[in-house]
Amino acid sequence: LCEPCVFGKQNRVTFSKSGRNGVVERMNKTLNERAKSMRAHAGLPKTFWVNAVSIAAYLIS
C-alpha cells in the first residue's frame, strides 16, 4: 500500500499570498514563465521542462 492509502485522505495546505511564501511563490512563477518561454523559443517538447527550469534558475542566480 502507498503512504496516502495507509494514512487516509491528506489535507491540502493553502499558502499565504504575503510574507515569505509570497516571495517563494513569485520566484516559482518566474522560473516557470522563463522555462516555458525558453522551451517555446527552442521548439522543445514538454519533456525538457526540468532542464529548462534548471537553466532558468542558473541564469537568475
Image (tube, rainbow, N blue to C red):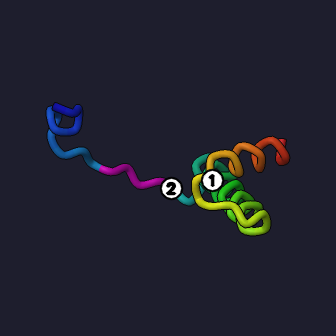
| Amino acid type at image mark 2 | Ser
Residue pointed to by mark 1: 49
Asked if the residue at tag 1 contacts the one at tag 2, i.e. Cβ–Cβ closer than 8 Å, the answer is no
Badge 1 element = helix
Q: Earlier in the sequence, mark 2 or mark 1?
A: 2
**In the displayed structure, does residue 7 sit left or right of residue 22?**
left
How far across and down, in percent of the image, does residue 11 sit? 27, 48
| Camera-side mark, 2 or 1 | 1
On-image quarter of the C terminus: top right
User: Is 23 colored magenta in this rendering?
Assistant: no
- Dot 2: within a 10 Å radius of its alpha carbon, few (fewer than 14), some, or many (20 or more) residues? few
The magenta-colored residue range is 12-16
Could you tell me how many numbered marks the image carries?
2
**In the displayed structure, does residue 1 sit left or right of residue 19?**
left
Q: Is residue 56 positioned above or below 43 on the image?
A: above
Q: How far apart are marks 2 and 1 (CA)?
A: 26 Å
On-image quarter of the N terminus: top left
Q: Main secondary structure of the magenta part?
A: loop
Label ID, residue 57: none
Q: Residue at x 50, y 55 (%)?
A: 16
Tell me where residue 35 sits by quadrant: bottom right
Q: Residue at x 68, y 63 (%)?
A: 36
How far across and down, in percent of the image, does residue 25 sit? 60, 54
How far across and down, in percent of the image, does residue 56 sit? 77, 50
Q: Which residue is drawn at 17% across and 34% down?
A: 7
Residue pointed to by mark 2: 16
| Amino acid type at image mark 1 | Trp
How far across and down, in percent of the image, does residue 49 sit? 62, 53
Q: Residue at x 85, y 46 (%)?
A: 59
